[in-house]
Image (spheres, rainbow, N blue to C red):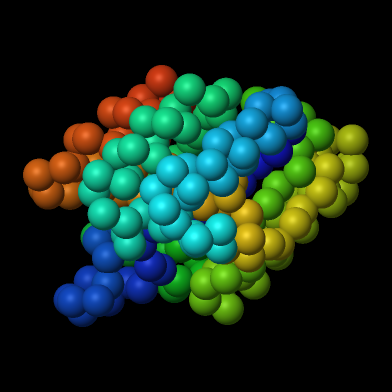
Amino acid sequence: MLVFIDESGDTGLKLDCKTTSPYFIVTLMLFEDHDQATLADERIESLKAELGLRAEFEFHFSKLQPKWREHFLREIAGHEFFYFAVVLDKAELTAHGIHSPTELYRYTCGLVFEAAKPYLRDAIVVTDGQGSELLRREMSSFLRKKAHPESPHESPIRKVKLQDSHKNNLLQLADMVCGAVARSLTDKKDSTVYRKLISHREMEVAHWPK
């Protein structure tokens, strides 16, 4: 089993700051079958050629034209992957004892892994090596603990890999899925378009606090 992790928003808690997002979202995407992951990887690669893009082009939800977002998700939706996401409403967090970006990040990761845990078996988890130092450090620490519990046979995680998303098409897919969830929380005119295209791949999108 292959698992890919991505996040949307930021971990800032100063909500009066214009650059701070109201939500922080972590998405966990899984392929039960490695062959299906390979097929999805190859389809994403072929999409670059179809769209006249360079081989090293990186699909990133926030940077794509709307028509390319829709085309990407429509074409990839037929492949056998599933996803979970947790959406934290940061306006409600201090009342629940979360007072720092580190606590916010750890808590969100914990929630999404608990949601997916019944489905994880011998998983290779891949996460993005790009992004902020805080997120890289916290995700690496969190996954190491999950992969090496006191009783090793209890871990659903076999291996953890840190890779650059611009070299990994399936991390780019995780970004596109996470972006679709994030867009669905807005009042923009295309807010319902993208998540609907992959709705049959959605296992759970949990909002916290509930």
Residue 165 image-quadrant placement: bottom right
Query: In this orientation, which residue lies closer to the viewer: 67 or 205?
Result: 67
Residue 58 image point, x, y percent: 49, 60
Q: Give me the residue at 31% from left, 34% from top.
A: 195
Q: Is residue 177 toward the left or the right of residue 15 in the image?
A: right
- Count of residue discs: 0
Q: Is residue 77 above or below residue 101?
A: above
Asked if one can make out residue 101 in the rendered structure from this viewpoint, the answer is yes
Q: Residue at x 64, y 72 (%)?
A: 137
Regarding residue 115, the answer to whether it shows in the image is: no
Quarter of the figure with residue 138: bottom right
Q: Quadrant of the C terminus?
A: top left
Q: Is residue 16 left or right of residue 123?
A: left
Q: Nearer the viewer, residue 204 or 162?
A: 162
> Looking at the image, which is closer to me, 142 or 169?
169
Residue at 38% x, 67% y is 10
Q: In which quadrant of the rendered view does residue 75 lie? A: top left
Q: Is residue 47 above or below residue 175?
A: above
Rendered location of residue 96, percent (x, y):
37, 56
Which part of the image, by quadrant, shows the N terminus? top right
Image location of residue 92, percent across then percent down? 27, 56
Left or right of residue 38, residue 200 in this image: left
Q: Residue at x 56, y 58 (%)?
A: 55
